[in-house]
Amino acid sequence: MVDFLQQVINGLAQGGIYSLIAIGWTTVFGIVGIINWTHGEIYMLGAYAGWLITTYAHLPIIPSLLLSMVLGAFIAMAVDEIGYRPLRKKGVLAATGFITALGLSQTIRYSASAGFSPNPKAYPVLVNQELITLVSIGDKKITISSVHLIVLFSAVVIMSLLELFMKKTLTGKAMLAASQDMQTLRLMGVNAESLIKITFAISGALGAAAGFFIGMLYYINPMMGALAGLKGWSCAILGGIGSIAGSLVGGIILGIVENLTAGYISTGYKDAIGFMVMILVLLIRPSGLMGYRFEEKV
Amino acid sequence: MAMLEVRDLNVYYGKIHALQGISIDVSEGEIVSLIGANGAGKTTLLTAIMHQLPYSGTVRFMGEDLTKTDVKDIVNLGMTMVPEGRKVFARTSVQDNLLLGSYVRRKDQTSVREDLEKVYSLFPRLEERKKQLAGSLSGGEQQMLAIGRALMSRPRLLLLDEPSMGLSPILVDTVFDTISHISKTGTTILLVEQNARKALKIAGRGYVIETGQLYLADTSENLLNDSRVKEAYLGG
Ligand SMILES: Nc1ncnc2c1ncn2[C@@H]1O[C@H](COP(=O)(O)OP(=O)(O)OP(=O)(O)O)[C@@H](O)[C@H]1O
Ligand SMILES: [Mg+2]
């Protein structure tokens, strides 16, 4: 039992990271109506931005994280401006956006590989590694690593801020309305294009934050966006596409399932079993865990 | 010069010539009703006026040419539409729906709050349900919300697309009373309706369109007594 709980705790930080990626997917899908396949690449570039900033500018963790998020926001807005907006203006985004996204995604991935070299990179130490005891049961302890704790805590803070933004600001409310009916929202005098840019900025900032956190935990490499992007999208579907709360839950579940698999079966099976669990859940609940709502309200 | 001038408006859906050179006017202070059978092109006309559809011809509002103006700027100029079928944001609360209606005036929160109170006094039901999701409202309440949301932009000209659609007779009367009331508070109204008798009764003038063309244009009184209108739209 103690062992099991320990594995669950170990999966939380990774789960929070998946949640951040998933929310980025789900907001763009909900509002712009496209599956933004470059999202994994933005996550990867966010990880490299963090690596550059922490390695060469020697900034502390919070400014580095914020700066990476700002860069991620700009990259995502640039992707929209270059890749999607021209198609949107012609009214062919739904049909052709997928191809553009795949092309852009490959371009970014291999440019990063050329620029940063395909070799993995490691962040400098930003926080002291230590094990914090959460509870002791007899001679057994449940612990969490300080790095995991900081990653998890930061992810929760970022998601709470997003939740506040969506609930309390008129722009956030407009985003929720846009995910329901953009055509009618335009009748309120809302500038759809700026709303879409804000959506990409948020998505990019969250993706970059996820990349930064991964950099704090593991080595980074230019190909890391492929699988993580796919997993993030899957978590978004698992949680119920369009639902921010669903993405959060979906990410945490995947993080925990992967860790339990690694702990009890084998690390080699963790991706396969993670996807299998998601497929099972979707067979039972095709609309995802939190249904089809963009977010839950009273 | 009329407040709204539509001249020789043509709209195509692919090969379908949905509006074939329609011209109408609405002057400040009027209620003008537009009637026509299903598929005549009423919704198309209002949607084109708001520039949510491409068209040829001209639309002028308060002297400004709108042929190159984006819908968001049209709302800013003071023309707002209550779309066909209400189109409230179902997964958004009633109050947030209203606040979204005030989007173009978001910089002026004091007057937004005042207008919120006005809408709530016009529709007390909405105030009782302000925290509820709009999707949980009844059809009549959703129509009130759609009208209230449009009023939150403080329109000079309000376009209404079949506000009585699908409502019980009592609610239909309430909706028409509300429209008269809004008109008396200084908002000009262009009303699209299937309920021709009621629509013409509250209006000063009316237009009848048939299959994308203007068929009749006259005062409401004359239209109500016109044998062609009686036969086709007033049930003989
Ligand atoms: N998006 C569209 N694509 C193709 N044809 C359309 C489209 N919208 C409307 N039409 C056609 O244009 C014509 C006018 O439609 P419109 O919706 O304007 O009629 P309406 O007068 O509002 O009818 P109703 O009273 O049923 O609302 C109809 O023949 C309709 O089939
Ligand atoms: Mg119609």
Image (cartoon, coloured by chain):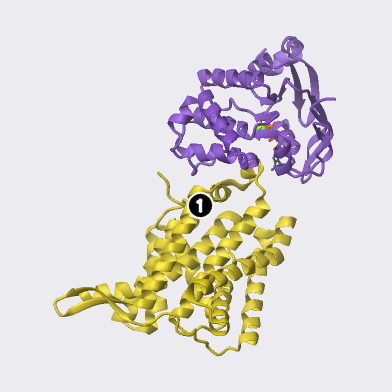
Chain colours: A yellow, B purple
For residue A276, which quarter of the picture? bottom left
Q: Provide residue B89's location: percent of width, then percent of height.
A: 54, 41
Does residue A240 appear anywhere in the picture? no
The picture quadrant where one finds residue B158 is: top right
Q: Is residue B65 left or right of residue B100?
A: right
Count of labels in the image: 1
- In the depicted view, which residue is nearer to us: B232 or B166? B166
Q: Position of residue A17 (x, y in %)?
A: 45, 70
The answer to whether A106 appears left or right of A295 in the picture is right
Residue occupying image coordinates x 56% and y 46%: A170
Q: Position of residue A67 (x, y in %)?
A: 57, 71
Q: Could you tell me which quadrant the N terminus of chain B lies in?
A: top right
Q: Looking at the image, is B37 positioned above or below residue B153?
A: above
Vertical position of residue B145 compared to residue A53: above or below = above
- Of residues B166 and A134, the one nearer the viewer is A134
Q: Residue at x 58, y 21 (%)?
A: B178
**Ligand 1 placement by image quarter:** top right
Mark 1 = which residue?
A166
In the rendered structure, which amino acid carries the disc numbered 1? Answer: Met
Give the image location of residue B106, x and y in percent. Answer: 61, 42
Quarter of the image for the C terminus of chain B: give it. top right
The chain containing the residue under callout 1 comes to A
Residue at image location 55% in from the left, 66% down from the top: A205
In this rendering, position of residue B41 left or right of residue B110: right
Graded by Cα atoms within 10 Å as few (under 14), some (14 to 19) or many (20 or more), the crowding at tag 1 reads some
Disc 1 element: helix
